Structure formats: structure tokens, C-alpha cells
């Protein structure tokens, strides 16, 4: 089975749909990641994680495939930094819904939107409800780190506030995936120290929701402790995350197939 949907012909997709595959739709962002990481971090990483997870599922004889990545997301809080491209929330919702409806029309209905950017999470909650209650389409969504929160907590070396943006986690993963484009000499630590009620870390969401631009929180765009990142740690975490997502793909493939928004 091919990994990428884009490598299929339309006739092959017709045959593929008969196998009821799990379809991973990666959703990223195109935004600043400090002075040491490139703009492509979110879309690049989530795409690679999706592809590797599907590769692993194929080794278990599970039918699965990856769509092209949605490379830009909801990033208005990063627009003060040059290069960031942000899609308006209503535009992104429409884009995702159009893609999902197209997949459904072609009988590719077992869909996981795999997210790689924190700013998209609120959008995805809205998309889930609109698809379910406006279109009778039932899908699943998750951020790639959601599958390995306990493992990330054990993996990390930073204190609370060290994993947030262009941080220990993202920098380690990028060192593993494409070390040559990481500007190690420009790494700056900036753990967030504001009230814990507002959230300071990936593993410690805040009780209270607030909005802030990244320029208000960091002059250089980093929140976390990227100095603790290593290529070896990135390889270990990549393996953990893709194994966990592969486990979900296997489980998801056994769910009762949604039919017009309801389980059979």
C-alpha cells in the first residue's frame, strides 16, 4: 500500500476506499520559531510524523494513508515576526471542512486530523462540531503530542515552562529530522514565568484562558528551554510519538464505521 494519497491514481483510490483505510490529514502552521528554527517547523514535523506513523501501521498490515499537509494554520499571535503566514479562523474552518467533505464523497471516511500547532486546537474543536451537526460527518482530531503526554513528561529535562514554543521538544525533534537547518548558535532559553493559571507549558495548561501575542511574551520568539535539546533526544521522542500514533491508527481502524454521523 502506498503511504501518500497524492501518489494514487483515481482508479487506485476507488480500490483503496473499498478497504476503508484510516486517513491522516496533517495540519500544521507557517510561523516564526525563534532565531534558531525555520518557519516550516509545524507543518514539516507533523507531516513527517504522520508519514512515519502510517509506515509503521503498514508493517502491521493496517490500511492507512496520508493526505497532503495543510501547511498554514491559525497564527495571528506570531504575525509580529516576519515570515509568519496566518489563515483566518473562518477560512481555515472552511478549508478543513471542504477537504473532509471531499474525502467523504470519495468514501474515505475514517479520518484523523493530526495537528501540529497549538493555535489550531480551538479551530479543530469547532470543526468537529460543525462537521458532526451541520454535515453529519464524524471524524477524529488530535495533536501529535497528545498521544504521548506521559512519555514526554518522563523524557523532558527542562523544568515547568521549558516546553512551549521553539522549545526543548520542538528543537530536539528538528535536530533529529533536519539538523542542518537548526541554527544552534542562536539558541536562547526563555521559560515562561507568568501565572500558572494562564498556562506556561505544554504539559500544564492553564485554568484561565487568555490571549497574548508572542511579541508580548518573547522578544525573540522562543518560549521554553531549547538549550536542553539534542538530536538523540529528538530521535527517541520521534520514535515514541510515532509508535503511539501507530497504536491509535490500529485501534481507530477497528471502530465501527461512521454512517451519516452515526455508528452502524
Image (cartoon, rainbow, N blue to C red):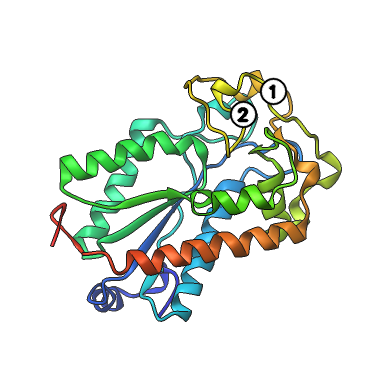
Q: Nearer the viewer, residue 195 or 87?
A: 195
Disc 2 + disc 1, Cβ < 8 Å? yes
Q: Give the CA distance from mark 2 to mark 1.
A: 7 Å
Q: Nearer the viewer, residue 20 or 148?
A: 148
- 242 lies above or below 87: below
Residue 26 location in percent, x, y? 45, 54
Local packing at callout 2 (Cα closer than 10 Å; few below 14, some 14-19, many 20+) is many
Residue 108 location in percent, x, y? 26, 64
Residue 254: quarter of image: bottom left
Residue at (54, 53) in percent of width and height: 148
Residue at (29, 76) in percent of width and height: 16
- 175 lies above or below 216: below
Q: Secondary structure at mark 1?
A: loop
Q: Which residue is mark 1?
A: 193
Work out whether residue 246 can be spotted: yes
Q: Secondary structure at mark 2?
A: loop
Residue 17 location in percent, x, y? 25, 72
Residue 45: quarter of image: bottom right
Residue at (33, 52) in percent of width and height: 140
Q: Which residue is mark 2?
A: 200
Residue at (50, 52) in percent of width and height: 144
Q: Quadrant of the N terminus?
A: bottom left
Amino acid at each position: 500500500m502506498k503511504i501518500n494519497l497524492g501518489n494514487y491514481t483515481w482508479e487506485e483510490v476507488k480500490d483503496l476506499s473499498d478497504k476503508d483505510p484510516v486517513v491522516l490529514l496533517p495540519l500544521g502552521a507557517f510561523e516564526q520559531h525563534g532565531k534558531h528554527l525555520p518557519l516550516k517547523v509545524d507543518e514539516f514535523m507533523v507531516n513527517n510524523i504522520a508519514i512515519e506513523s502510517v509506515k509503521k501501521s503498514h508493517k502491521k498490515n493496517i490500511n492507512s494513508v496520508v493526505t497532503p499537509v495543510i501547511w498554514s494554520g491559525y497564527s495571528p499571535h506570531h504575525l509580529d515576526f516576519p515570515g509568519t503566514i496566518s489563515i483566518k479562523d473562518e477560512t481555515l474552518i472552511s478549508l478543513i471542512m471542504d477537504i473532509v467533505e471531499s474525502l467523504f464523497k470519495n468514501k474515505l471516511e475514517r479520518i484523523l486530523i493530526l495537528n501540529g500547532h497549538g493555535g489550531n486546537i480551538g479551530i479543530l474543536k469547532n470543526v468537529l462540531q460543525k462537521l458532526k451537526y451541520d454535515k453529519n460527518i464524524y471524524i477524529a482530531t488530535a495533536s501529535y503530542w497528545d498521544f504521548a503526554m506521559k512519555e514526554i513528561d518522563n523524557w523532558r529535562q527542562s523544568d515547568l515552562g521549558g516546553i512551549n514554543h521553539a522549545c526543548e521538544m520542538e528543537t530536539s525533534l528538528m535536530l533529529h529530522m533536519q539538523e542542518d537547518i537548526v541554527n544552534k548558535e542562536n539558541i536562547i532559553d526563555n521559560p515562561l514565568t507568568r501565572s500558572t493559571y494562564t498556562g506556561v507549558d505544554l504539559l500544564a495548561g492553564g485554568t484561565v484562558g487568555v490571549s497574548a501575542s508572542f511579541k508580548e511574551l518573547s522578544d525573540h520568539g522562543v518560549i521554553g528551554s531549547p538549550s536542553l535539546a539534542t538530536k538523540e533526544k529528538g530521535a527517541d521522542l520521534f520514535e515514541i510519538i510515532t509508535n503511539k500514533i501507530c497504536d491509535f491508527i490500529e485501534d481507530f481502524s477497528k471502530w465501527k464505521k461512521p454512517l451519516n454521523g452515526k455508528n452502524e
